[in-house]
Image (tube, helix red, strand yellow):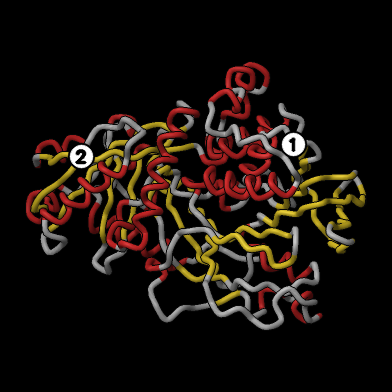
Amino acid sequence: MDLNVLIVGGGIHGAGLLHDLATRNLRGIHLVEQNQLASGTSSRTTKLVHGGLRYLEHPSQWGLVREALRERGILLRNLPGIVRPMPFVLPNFRGGRPPWLVQTGLTLYDLLDRVSGLPSARRLTHAELAQMAPYLRPERIAQETGSAFLFYDAQMQDDVIVRLAVRAATRLDATYQEETRVEDVIREGTGFCVKLASSRGRQEVTARVIVNAAGAWCNANLLRWGVTPRVPCLLDVGSHLLFRSQAVPARPEDCAATLLQHEDGRVVFFIPWEGRWLLGTTESALTGTPDHWECPAGDRDYLLKVAAVNLDLAEAERHIEEFFCGIRTFPLRASTPAQAGQPAPGIWRENPFASPFYKRRLEKDVSSLSREAVVDEVVPNLITIYGGKFTTYRALCEGVGDRIADRLKCARRSGTREQESWFLDELRETEPGLFHSYSDLRHG
């Protein structure tokens, strides 16, 4: 198989780029995923398409918030029902931020959003707060809430978006393979010979461009392919508890979500989702490797502590349906190692997660790290995507797609801004199963 572009990784960035390149009418675009599409972090998110209200505390991230709000509007328009508006209540507990500061942040949030058409933020009375968020502890509302606000963001079926992007791409002649791993990459001139392995056997393909979009495995891939990276990264575990609907004496579909700031300053979401309740997320440095790891028991305890302080849940532990985690990749803009791009030492090829390109701890709080993605081309035509937010995936893939299209002399622009590029009506008719999330299939 002779390819123009081989994409490695079937999460949101790999799927999004496959879709982007296919809308440009590029041929020879293929994706491989070592497991199943969206089987990793892209199905283990907080299920939100949002601008990142809390990022407004850092002026350096305002540009990311503006981009995320724009992309939120595009996804709401293009994927109705799969991405949908979500009301949020924001209780401002005593001892927290001054009400005027919260109001200012919400006003700025609305001003930065120019495309979604969602309602503007407003203040809530205590009675309105209790009605929209009946899961909050009554004494917490009565005694400790100095003010409360209502604002809007959006909710998504994360894994559904990934699968729809790939299937839409196949309507435009792109191809993909699941349960296929890259065993080796060999540079040949300006392109590559790639050895693939799957249950169907081994095959070799050639590719003019390779995009390494494997999330937590990105630097491990480079090292196993004999290339030394130049962007170190931190792998961070985000944990969530999913509660049955009975945990709250109210229907999830009748309630708003909420942001809760715990006593340590960290923000946790409590969200009605698919007839259940979702609480998360945490921030814990990964122990082990993405190939062999478990959700940290301490994260479960932390989330239950947040619930006990803020939420009026009936027998919370008894109603836990699932404890799940995703691994986020935070690129660290460290100094470029002198050996970057050169052949990787053998020990790192055998044990890449022990290399200096995977950090185990930081001196500062992980929450202060930027959620912006880093796109690096450590050797010509081998592009790696690090980090990024699910909400802004389309814009990131459009930028990478522009770079690749220019290199391959393709003048056509991305079509992913247009709803027609998703083929939703056709896919609902021919493949209705695509519209059910993994969670529906596990708990339905």
Give above or below for 383 relative to 312: below
- The reply to whether residue 435 is in sight is yes
**In percent of the image, x 71 and y 26: which residue is there?**
171
Residue in the foreground of this view, choosing between 133 and 67: 67
Provide the residue designation for mark 1: 26
Marks 2/1: CA–CA distance:
43 Å
Can you give x and y, in whole percent of width and height, for residue 317 in the image? 38, 53
**Closer to the camera: disc 2 or disc 1?**
1
Can you give x and y, in whole percent of width and height, for residue 74 in the image? 45, 34
Residue in the foreground of this view, choosing between 303 and 78: 78
Relative to 160, 152 lies left or right: left
Give above or below for 217 relative to 347: above
Earlier sequence position, callout 2 versus callout 1? 1
At label 2, the amino acid type is Ala
Q: Quadrant of residue 305?
A: bottom left
- The reply to whether residue 291 is in sight is no
Q: Quadrant of residue 432?
A: top right
Residue in the foreground of this view, choosing between 341 and 106: 341
**In percent of the image, x 41 and y 56: which residue is there?**
281
Can you give x and y, in whole percent of width and height, for residue 385 in the image? 62, 58
Relative to 416, 171 lies left or right: right
At label 1, the amino acid type is Leu
Residue in the foreground of this view, choosing between 393 and 431: 393
Provide the residue designation for mark 2: 121
